[in-house]
Image: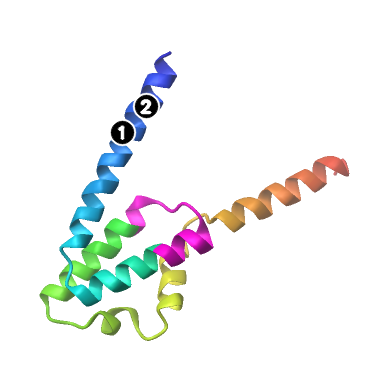
Amino acid sequence: MRNLLNKIIGDIGEKKEWRATEARAKKLPHDYLVVYNEIKQYIWRGAGPASIDIFKSLLDLFEESAANGKAVLEITGDNVAAFCDELLRDEKTYFETLRERLNRDIAIKLKK
C-alpha cells in the first residue's frame, strides 16, 4: 500500500512540475514558443519519454536568450534537429532501451 501511495504522490508531483514547466514555456516570445513546441514533439517522437530536466534546461536557455534579445535560431542554429540530438546526448532514449532489450532477449534465448 505504501508503494502505491508513493507512486501516486510521485506522479502528482511530476504532473505539477510538468504543468509549471509548460506555464513557463507559454510566457516565451512567440518564435521561442514555436521552436520549443517543435523541439518537444521531436524529442517525444524520436526519443520517447524524456526527462523533464531537459525541458527545464531548455527553458532556462530560451528565457535567458530572449531576455538578451537574441533570435531563437541564433541559439539553436538552422539545424534544430542536430541541436535536439545534442540535448539528448546523455539521455537514455527509447531506442537505446529497445536495443538493450533486444540484445538481452536474444542472448537469453541463445543462452549466451
Q: Is residue 64 left or right of residue 75?
A: left
Q: Is residue 84 above or below residue 106?
A: below
Q: How is the image coloured?
A: rainbow
Q: Residues within 10 Å of mark 1 (few under 14, many from 20)?
A: few
Residue 31 placement: quadrant: bottom left
Q: Which residue is drawn at the image coordinates 33% and 66% (left, top)?
A: 37
Q: Return the mark for residue 8.
A: 2
In this image, 89 relative to 98: left or right? left
The residue range painted magenta reads: 41-54
Q: Which of 105 and 8 lies nearest the eye of the viewer?
A: 8
> Is 7 within the magenta?
no
Cβ–Cβ under 8 Å for marks 2 and 1:
yes
Q: Which residue is mark 1?
A: 12
What's the mark number on residue 109?
A: none
Q: Is residue 57 left or right of residue 84?
A: left
Percent position of residue 35, x then y: 31, 73
Q: CA distance from mark 2 to mark 1?
A: 6 Å
Q: Residue at x 81, y 40 (%)?
A: 108
- Horizontally, residue 3 falls left or right of residue 62, namely right
Disc 2 residue type (three-letter): Ile
Element on which disc 1 rests: helix
Q: Quadrant of residue 72?
A: bottom left
User: Main structural element of the magenta stretch: helix, strand or loop?
Assistant: helix
| Amino acid at the residue labelled 1 | Ile
Locate the C terminus and report the quarter of the image it occupies. top right
Q: Nearer the viewer, residue 30 or 73?
A: 30
Identified at 42% across, 64% down, the residue is 41
Local crowd size for mark 2, using a 10 Å CA cut-off: few (<14), some (14–19), many (≥20): few
Find numbered disc 2 in the image and state the secondary structure of the residue it sits on: helix
Relative image position of residue 78 (x, y in whole percent)? 37, 86
Image quarter (top left, top right, bottom left or bottom right) of the N terminus = top left
